Image: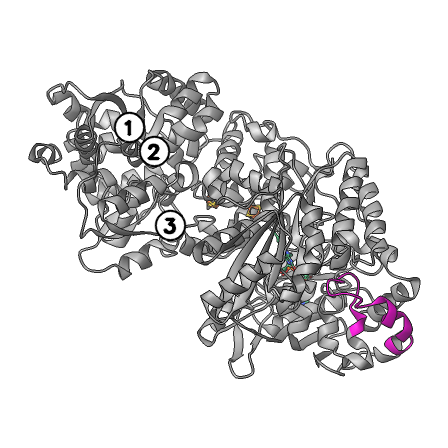
Amino acid sequence: MSLVEALRAAGLTEVEDGTRRRAEYSSDASNHRVVPTAVAYPRHTDEVLAALAVCRELGVPLTMRGGGTSIAGNAIGPGLVLDTSRHLTRILALDPEAATATVQPGVVLDDVTRAGAPHGLAYGPDPSTHSRATFGGTIGNNACGAHAMSAGRAADTVVALDVVTAAGDQFTAGPGSAGPVDLWPVVDGALAAIRTGSGRFHRQVSGYSLEHLLPERGRHVGRFLAGSEGTLAVLLEATVSLARVPAATALVVLGYPDMPAAADAVPGLLPHAPRAVEGLDARLVEVVRGRKGQDAVPDLPRGEGWLFVEVGGTSPADAADAARRLAADAGALDSLVVTGADALRLWRIREDGAGLGGRTPAGAPAWPGWEDAAVPPEHLGAYLRDFRGLLDAHGLDALVYGHFGDGCVHARIDFPFADRPRVYREFVTAAADVVAGYGGSVSGEHGDGRARSELLPRMYAPELIAAFAAVKHAFDPTGLLNPGVITDPEPLDATLRVPAARALPSRVFTLPHDGGDLSVAAHRCVGVGKCRADATATGGVMCPSFLATRDEKDSTRGRARVLQEAANGTLVGGLAAPEVLESLDLCLSCKGCASDCPAGVDMATYKSEALHARYRRWWRPRSHWSLGWLPVTARLVARAPRLVNALLGTTAVAALARAAGGIDPARPLPRFTEQTFRAWFADRPVRTGGDPVVLFVDTFTDHFTPAVGQAAVAVLEDAGFAVRVTEPVCCGLTWISTGQLDTARSRLARTVAALDVGLPVVGLEPSCTAVLRGDAEELVPGEAAARVAAATHTLAELLATRTGWSPPDLTGVHGVAQPHCHQHAVLGWEADRALLAAAGADVTAVGGCCGLAGNFGAEAGHHAVSVAVAETALLPAVRAAAPGATFLADGFSCRTQLDQVGGVRGEHLAELLAARLPATGARDAVR
Ligand SMILES: Cc1cc2nc3c(=O)[nH]c(=O)nc-3n(C[C@H](O)[C@H](O)[C@H](O)COP(=O)(O)OP(=O)(O)OC[C@H]3O[C@@H](n4cnc5c(N)ncnc54)[C@H](O)[C@@H]3O)c2cc1C
Ligand code: SF4
Ligand code: SF4
């Protein structure tokens, strides 16, 4: 019987061994690649026990997984991977009095923090991945985070763990209780080695934390199991303590000449009992500014290395006082005390550090592998100096940051995996010796996994290494659970992903930041998993398909993994393989990842390339013709729009048209306008005077919503512009999103030539405007495309350049705005926000994507997901809006979705402004 058959026979229903699924689970957030035999999603504890029994019977290794954000290859394995994050997500109890929570292993940390918030409680340890990391994985790794220095590590929060051993013995691991495991003889036989070698400082996370088993430490088996990385037992339920949220906090930013100098200052800060002390390299801030704009990071104090220090207080004033006292004592070049939203913004930059550090300032890929070593804080400055010397000696570079208060240093290093993978081994072994020399730990919070287990003998005495092996044997004598990790380790360079990848030269997009190689681009994804978190409340967009389906397949990361496997070629047979198509099917091409993924994965672009590669030799889906060629069809329809509308208005013809065009039966067909915008524009009297501006007339404005164009003309003329239009040209968006890239390129080349006239260009449809400003330079590279990109503006951006003009009064306007996802990713919505605020409107922007996203929501089979995406943020906001609300949406897709799914009329910014222009003539223009 195969593994999958045996699992199904044992009652598991969600078991998969397809190549796509195995590709998705072939890595975590590490450099390592181990393809599992199968992946299963247990629906309840009994299914975990059943899966374990099957593995035991068949001798198949079992690796547990939560969010899969481990950086050291801790959550990958060759046999069965059991993912608890889909179903085992219940908070079983929250006791405000005792300040504890009992959770299933798949519960995400932030969910408990949210549940605890009304009681002033939160889960204390906060790995940067707290929005998607689970309790199973957090306890599995003994994760820490910025606040671990005050709130403790995951191990410190463990009250009791319900676990099952490889043999199937279930017990509650707590003080003194090891169930049927014959643990104590091992411990008692190694007491001296444990006392001198284990638990020497707070961030000694490597190896097994045997110190918790010492009699004088209460022999807490639950705490000991934290950090055992799923190698000793499977966690079924956990009871953890929660931390009290302080009444107020303040952030002090301290500037130092460099990172070692910042590190030297840390011990002097500790008497102030800070809640967190984080280090941040100036070069990392430059990377953030380079990627997200100069304004992305507020001005920081003078210096090249900063400490971000959080202090608590009984009130905001008390916290600010404590902050100032600490700053006065810090020996810094300069300092800044920040509170409220600014502090949150700075913390977010720090949390994105690992992803942003995925490139060196020179743009080279930088990797984990030596990313969380820790030394006692008093040695941190010396360690950092040695570390820099070691990097230089190996010709490497890294951006440094980390939990300096605890002596834990994060670094992403530009290991030359592709051409000289040996450097990796040489560097990490040398670095392990340096760390051990300072009494440090090769892992300070991420665990050992496949990256560091081999290094443990460099920091631990042989007696302790022997004790680790004996403990493993006591719990898991046959080596069923996560083999190759901690004991009997796999060589640290045996399963590296990047050296095994081939190039996948892109055919059309130039991918200038990835050397034109889709393989390099896909390997930007290090697996951080931010694409599995819901950031819509803070305006984020990535990744709407995952938020709708909650399936790893539909996350940006899942897709990147499949593309990486396409580059590897041993599991997935290249870019045109069916697994790639399946993986990309529910990608909305919303570009949310292009801006929100800290590693800069731009899946919409990779999808275009993959569709282009696939359909060079295969017959395209019908929707690629009907929706991809819409600009051409619309121009043909413009000859007899009434007839076409009448025909499409009949049920039978509409059904036929949908079937022929691969359109979802649930999707109403849009009506073509009877007078196009261009026809209207050509008919109106020529206006003279004003500063010339080119209005880019997109297909949607021209053929479906000319009122938007007419409103824009009114507003632009009111602002003193003389509007011009070009010959009919198209940005090629519909061909780009359907992967018809040769056609897209030829259309775009004409468009760029038509727009390159030395005048500002204003676009009304955000997705088309985003092509002119973004994709064009990668599809038709050259100076003309660069000039057009620089000249292209959104309406709000262009209006912001009119210093003497003020917008019409929008006092009393209230409601909801859905910034188009491409606007969010490429153009930004800040100018719109500022314009609306200046005009007196009270409009709240929602995050996420509307769910229609061009062709996506119209395509057959996508309707349910399209609606589920809309339900993430937009539709709840529509339902919650006060009576008389305005629904602002510049995207034709977003307005269509609002109309068809939300049951409300969406307005373009141009329409909102034009309807309130003071001049009656202008108002007439829009009627
Ligand atoms: C960008 C980035 C930043 C990070 N920042 C931090 C940080 O600040 N601090 C920090 O400590 N870590 C950090 N991490 C590492 C990681 O995110 C954390 O350790 C996190 O808590 C892991 O949770 P997870 O659910 O993703 O675990 P997974 O990766 O799924 O699993 C972690 C380990 O636990 C085991 N495991 C999972 N479930 C079970 C179970 N039910 N029973 C037994 N074993 C189980 C797995 O086998 C694996 O060995 C970071 C990672 C990334 C990518
Ligand atoms: S796609 Fe981006 S956000 Fe998602 S895991 Fe990969 S690197 Fe992280
Ligand atoms: S383009 Fe949008 S849907 Fe596709 S992977 Fe990126 S964020 Fe997700």
- Residue type, numbered disc 2: Ser
801 with respect to 78 (left or right):
left
Q: Which residue is mark 3?
A: 866
Q: Which residue is mark 2?
A: 626
343 with respect to 444 (left or right):
left
Span highlighted in magenta in the image: 187-211
Q: Is residue 683 above or below residue 910?
A: above
Q: Is residue 857 above or below residue 225?
A: above
Q: Give how far apart the Cα atoms at labels 3 and 1 are.
A: 24 Å
Q: Nearer the viewer, mark 3 or mark 1?
A: 3
Q: Which one is earlier in the sequence, the residue at label 3 or at label 1? A: 1
Q: Is residue 284 visible?
A: yes
Circle 3 residues within 10 Å: few <14, some 14–19, many ≥20: many
In depth, the one of 211 and 568 nearer the eye is 211
The location of residue 135, given as percent across then percent down, is 61, 67
| Residue with the most extreme front position | 328
